[in-house]
């Protein structure tokens, strides 16, 4: 028996399962892809066998540029999920029927708030990697 006088997420129809997945998973997956693929692109040309090389394997000099493009694409994807979550949060801010508005109260607002935190948080985490890409020498260790 339910004691609620109203549905806990009256604007739940504004947040489909696919959109929920996009909001909550895109930022972390973009960061994970950037870390895993970027590490492979940057490390293998310098360390293909048992010893580290002083210069990348010939023909693999462009992997640094590819890793940079990948980093920027993944940061943009994570930022896009954060922006989508922010727009969703603004659309469902008045979800409850009482006079008090609490940002995390209500299912759709809770999901949108965490989507925003994850999207923008992993955008920052991805861009922090840019410092390492710019400051750490390629092969000389």
Image: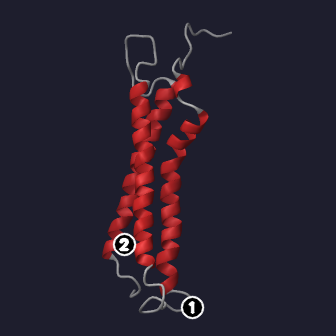
Q: Residue at x 41, y 18 (%)?
A: 94
Q: Quadrant of the C terminus?
A: bottom left
Secondary structure, mark 2, is helix
Residue at the image position 44 percent from the left and 72 percent from the top? 66
- Does the rendering let one see residue 122? no
> Could you say which disc has been placed on residue 115 in the image?
none
Q: Residues within 10 Å of mark 1 (few under 14, many from 20)?
A: few
- Figure label count: 2
Q: Position of residue 80 (x, y in %)?
A: 42, 46
In the displayed structure, 27 sits above or below 48; it is above
6 relative position to 139: left or right: right
Q: Where is mark 2, residue-wise?
A: 133
Rendered location of residue 79, percent (x, y): 40, 48
Residue 88 vs 131, above or below: the answer is above
Residue 24 image offset from top left, x and y in percent: 52, 42
Q: Which mark is residue 50?
A: 1
* Screen quadrant of the N terminus: top right
Label 1: which secondary element: loop
Q: Nearer the viewer, residue 85 or 73?
A: 73
């Amino acid at each position: 028996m339910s004691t609620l006088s109203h549905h806990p997420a009256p604007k739940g129809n504004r947040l489909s399962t696919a959109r929920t997945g996009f909001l909550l998973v895109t930022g972390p997956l973009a960061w994970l892809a950037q870390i895993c693929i970027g590490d492979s692109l940057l490390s293998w040309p310098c360390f293909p066998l048992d010893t580290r090389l002083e210069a990348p394997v010939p023909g693999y000099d462009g992997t640094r540029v590819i890793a940079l493009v990948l980093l920027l694409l993944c940061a943009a994807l994570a930022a896009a999920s954060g922006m989508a979550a922010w727009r969703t949060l603004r659309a469902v801010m008045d979800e409850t029927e009482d006079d008090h508005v609490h940002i995390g109260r209500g299912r759709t607002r809770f999901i949108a708030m965490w989507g925003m935190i994850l999207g923008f948080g992993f955008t920052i985490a991805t861009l922090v990697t840019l410092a390492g890409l710019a400051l750490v020498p390629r092969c000389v260790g």
